[in-house]
Every structure is written in structure tokens, then in C-alpha cells.
């Protein structure tokens, strides 16, 4: 008997089926042959939230959640953060290998050439309320870009696709900076392509009246590393949204907007904002025990803790904690750090968190750093979306090139009514749920 198979006995019929095992997985479609009778639809796999379903084969990012390992294209995140720039890592994620000097120079030029946005996009952004949430602004404006580049609908055209990828990677930081300036009522700064990718973002965010903006090297390095750590994270909620929306062959602008929407939620990228709100609410370390008690009673969650995949310390959180000290040397210490450190200390000893393998994730310390740099919590998730953009686009490209991928279309277990006939309104009974 082939050892790389799974023998399944259907106890309803007594039949035995051999299902092949490849790469530690069984093809879900093979379960369809398992039927009780000829007209039976066949077995499906029920997996709400895809906790144990591989929806694609991928070569981009590897996570070992138990050991706390994260690799982009095989390279450990720690080495990449130490030795490479964000654009080198973006290139690696998008094209599979680290670039040579000339490849990086062409890529950098391609990205920075696209940082300018159409003047009408600025007008579009001016329509937002002064207090609009920056993630909503970013998402809507990225979707609106689709109207400026109608050729992008041809997602099967390789050259056009490459052009859109460079444009999106180039324009997202500009849009993000404009969201920031908009909320503060400041004029938008045009990009400066004499600066590097991160330095140009800092210039667009923070330049005031000085002739030439000079980015602080420690803050630039911290942002560079934070961006590398946020670049990709395999099949998370927003990347899955990117692949799902993209599988209908929608253009990359609206598809990226869909991924930004998914990232904005507090259980995903929005957690960094939620962490800061939580730390503010806790206030001082004296209030931590009462807060932890509420968490354990299931009344609330300890934001920035826990992960679907990591059942160990998130390697990104470890590195972010280290960056915090360097940033605080420049900006002054964020007093919320004490509350965060104490929360972590208590949680890591507490049976509730230990038993559930809940450790700090990437969002636990990133917000504290961003706040020390002067960002408002509402903006934190935008700082996640900027570096995640090339990651989403790499996932999108891989999905489009994968011959096994079709339009994403899960099944459901229908548990609603069977057939029933419409009764005239005068004969209808009031339903339990009044609208
Ligand atoms: N605080 C308290 N309890 C928690 C937490 C938390 N942060 N996370 C999980 N649990 C408990 C949960 O109540 C459940 O307990 P029980 O078994 O008694 O019902 C158990 O741990 C398993 O939780 P789960 O909800 O089944 O786990 P999940 O894999 O569905 O959720 C998560 C993962 C990240 C959504 C969740 O841990 C969470 O809500 N964390 C807080 C939000 C957060 O920090 N999100 C950022 C994730 S990392 C950045 C990113 O990738 O976007």
C-alpha cells in the first residue's frame, strides 16, 4: 500500500477510500467522492475561518509558529532586518531573490518614479472630513486610483502588471502621508525622489518650512526595520482577502483596497491602535490586576497578545522591543512602556495565558514606538499597510501565476429552511426578530 495516503472508512456505507497525502496535506476535493448514495453531493470539509485549510501553495513566507520562526523566501527576518533595506526586502518578496546592486537601483528608480500622484487625487482626498479615519481614507483612495489607470484591468498582461505593482508600491506612501497631513490641516508635501523610500515618507509626513527635510537617521533606521518586519506574513486575513478579491481578476487597485479594509480590523492590523487605547484606559500599573481579571473572565481581550499561528513569542515582537530603546533615546521614553512591560510580565506568568500559549505579537510594542515618534493611534494601522503593500502584491502575483488557482468560492453547510411558499402579508405571523 502507498504509505503517502490516508485510508478513510465511511461508517455509513462501510466503504474505504484512499486519499493521497502531499506536502502534509490531503486534497479536500477528494472527499467529494465519499457519498452515502449516488445522488449524494459528497463530503465537504467544514473549516470556519480556515484554521486548518491550506488554500494555496506558496514560496513567499514561511512561519513556524511553535518555534517562533519567520522567513521571507528562506531568509530569516532577523538577518534581513539587520543587513537589508526595506526596498531590498520588497524586491525579494516580489521577485523571489535578493537584488544585485543594479537590480535594486532599477527597482528603486521604478518605485520612486511612481511616488507622485495625479493632482485630482489630491482633490479627491480634500473631500474627506478633517477627522476621517486614515485607514478609511487610504482604502478609499487606493480604490479610487483604479479610475486613473483603467488599463490595470488587464491583469493577465505581465508588463502592465509589473507597472501597476511599482505604481502601487510607490504611491501608497504618498497617499498615506497625505492622509496624515489632511487630518492635521497641513499642506501636502510632494515626494522628494532624492531621498530613499523611508526617508521620502518621513519628508512627506513631517517637512514643515525648512528648505530641505533632513530625516533623523535613528528614526529612519527604526522605520526601515519596522517596515521589514511588517512586509509579509503568509496567508493572514488581509493577504487572503487580496488573493480572494484578486481571484475574480479584479484590478490591483481595488484588490489592494480590499486588503487594506481587512487589515483595518482590531483583530488584525488594527490591533496596534487598540493596544494604545487599552494602555491609555489601564492608565497606571496599579490597575493591571483588575484589567487582567476582566480578560480572564472573558469580558475583554488583551490586545497585542495571541496569534492564530504563533504559539510562541512572535519573533517580530522581540525585535520591535529592541528598537523601542533606540527610538526612545531620540524621542524620550513613552510612559506607556512601563504599563506594557508590566502587562507582559504578569501575562507571561499567568496560567490563563500560559495554557493558551498567548504571547505578545507584532502589535504589542509597535504602537508605543509609533506614538513616541509623534503618530496618533488612528494612524498606526496605516504604518502597517504601507510596508504590507508589496507583500500583498507578491501574494497577488503568485496567485495569478498559479495554474491551480481559480476564482475563490468556498462552500457552505446550509442549515436554513428547506423549500417554503410565500404567504400573503395579511397572513404572516410576527417573527421573533423585529426589524
Ligand atoms: N486575550 C485574551 N484571551 C485571548 C486572546 C487575547 N488577546 N487571544 C486569544 N485568547 C483566548 C481565547 O479567548 C480562547 O480562549 P478559550 O479557549 O478559553 O475560548 C483562546 O485564547 C484561543 O483564542 P482564539 O480566539 O480561538 O484564537 P484565534 O487564533 O482565533 O485568534 C487572535 C487569534 C490574534 C485573533 C486573538 O489572539 C486575538 O484576538 N488577539 C488580540 C488581537 C490582536 O492582538 N491581534 C493582532 C494579531 S497579530 C498582527 C496581525 O497579524 O494582524
Image (tube, rainbow, N blue to C red):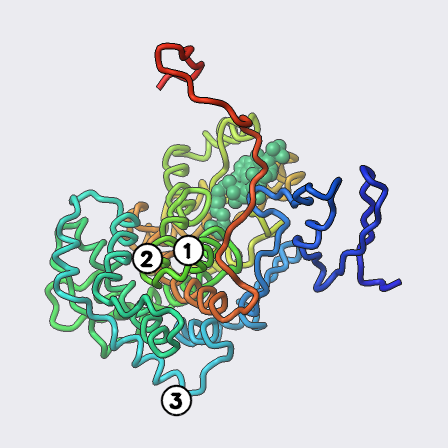
Write down the quadrant of residue 369 in the picture. Answer: bottom left
Q: Which of the marked residues, 2 or 1, is nearer the chain's N terminus?
A: 1
Label number found at residue 102: 3
| Mark 2 burial class by Cα count in 10 Å: few <14, some 14-19, many 20+ | many
Which x, y percent locates residue 158?
A: 39, 77
Q: Residue at x 35, y 19 (%)?
A: 435
Which x, y percent locates residue 279?
A: 40, 38
Q: Is residue 304 above or below residue 421?
A: below
Label 2–label 1 contact, CB within 8 A: yes
Q: Secondary structure at mark 1?
A: helix
Q: Is residue 212 above or below residue 54?
A: below
Q: Is residue 409 left or right of residue 129?
A: right
Check disc 2 and report the residue beneath it: 254
> How many discs appear?
3
Displayed-image quarter of ligand 1: top right
Which x, y percent locates residue 271?
A: 43, 45
Marks 3/1: CA–CA distance? 34 Å
From the viewer's side, name the closer residue of 69 and 113.
113
Q: Secondary structure at mark 3?
A: helix
Q: Residue furthest right?
A: 1
Q: In the image, which is nearer the foreground, mark 2 or mark 3?
A: 2
Q: Residue at x 16, y 64 (%)?
A: 189
Check disc 1 and report the residue beneath it: 245
Write down the quadrant of residue 385 in the picture. Answer: bottom left
Q: Residue furthest bottom?
A: 102
Q: Secondary structure at mark 2?
A: helix
Q: Residue at x 57, y 61 (%)?
A: 56
From the viewer's side, name the closer residue of 14 and 426.
426
Q: Is residue 73 left or right of residue 141?
A: right
* Residue 386 visible in the displayed image: yes
Pointer 3 residue Cβ closer than 8 Å to ligand 1: no
Amino acid at each position: 500500500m502507498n504509505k503517502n495516503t490516508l485510508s478513510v472508512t465511511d461508517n455509513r456505507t462501510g466503504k474505504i477510500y484512499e486519499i493521497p497525502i502531499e506536502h502534509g496535506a490531503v486534497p479536500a476535493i477528494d472527499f467529494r467522492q465519499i457519498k452515502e448514495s449516488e445522488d449524494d453531493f459528497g463530503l465537504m470539509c467544514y473549516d470556519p475561518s480556515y484554521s486548518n485549510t491550506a488554500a494555496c501553495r506558496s514560496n513567499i513566507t514561511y512561519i513556524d509558529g511553535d518555534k517562533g520562526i519567520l522567513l521571507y523566501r528562506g531568509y530569516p527576518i532577523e538577518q534581513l532586518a539587520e543587513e537589508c533595506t526595506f526596498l531590498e526586502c520588497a524586491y525579494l518578496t516580489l521577485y523571489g531573490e535578493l537584488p544585485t546592486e543594479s537590480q535594486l537601483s532599477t527597482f528603486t528608480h521604478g518605485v520612486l518614479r511612481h511616488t507622485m500622484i495625479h493632482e485630482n487625487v489630491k482633490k479627491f482626498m480634500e473631500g474627506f472630513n478633517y477627522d476621517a479615519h486614515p485607514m478609511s481614507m487610504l482604502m478609499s483612495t487606493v480604490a479610487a486610483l483604479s479610475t486613473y489607470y483603467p488599463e490595470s484591468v488587464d491583469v493577465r498582461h505581465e508588463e502592465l502588471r509589473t507597472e501597476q505593482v511599482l505604481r502601487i508600491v510607490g504611491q501608497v506612501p504618498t497617499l498615506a502621508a497625505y492622509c496624515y497631513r489632511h487630518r492635521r490641516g497641513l499642506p501636502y508635501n510632494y515626494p522628494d525622489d532624492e531621498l530613499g523610500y523611508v526617508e521620502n515618507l518621513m519628508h512627506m509626513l513631517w517637512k514643515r518650512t525648512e528648505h530641505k527635510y533632513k530625516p533623523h537617521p535613528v528614526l529612519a533606521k527604526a522605520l526601515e526595520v519596522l517596515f521589514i518586519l511588517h512586509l509579509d506574513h503568509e496567508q493572514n486575513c488581509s493577504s487572503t482577502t487580496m488573493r480572494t478579491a484578486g481571484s475574480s481578476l479584479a484590478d490591483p487597485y481595488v484588490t489592494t483596497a480590499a486588503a487594506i479594509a481587512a487589515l483595518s480590523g482590531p483583530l488584525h492590523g488594527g490591533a496596534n491602535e487598540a493596544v494604545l487605547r487599552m494602555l491609555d484606559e489601564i492608565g497606571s500599573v496599579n490597575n493591571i490586576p483588575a484589567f487582567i481579571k476582566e480578560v480572564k473572565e472573558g469580558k475583554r481581550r488583551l490586545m497585542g497578545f495571541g496569534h492564530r499561528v504563533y504559539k510562541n513569542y512572535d519573533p517580530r515582537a522581540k525585535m520591535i522591543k529592541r528598537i523601542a530603546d533606540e527610538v526612545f533615546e531620540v524621542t524620550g521614553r513613552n510612559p506607556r512602556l512601563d504599563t506594557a512591560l508590566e502587562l507582559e510580565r504578569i501575562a507571561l506568568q499567568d496560567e490563563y495565558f500560559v495554557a493558551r500559549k498567548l504571547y505578545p505579537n507584532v502589535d504589542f510594542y509597535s504602537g508605543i514606538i509609533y506614538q513616541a515618534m509623534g503618530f496618533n493611534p488612528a494612524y498606526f494601522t496605516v504604518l502597517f499597510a504601507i510596508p504590507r503593500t508589496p507583500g500583498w502584491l507578491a501574494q497577488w502575483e503568485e496567485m495569478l501565476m498559479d495554474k491551480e488557482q481559480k476564482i475563490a468560492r468556498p462552500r457552505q453547510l446550509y442549515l436554513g429552511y428547506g423549500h417554503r411558499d410565500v404567504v400573503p402579508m395579511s397572513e404572516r405571523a410576527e417573527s421573533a426578530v423585529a426589524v
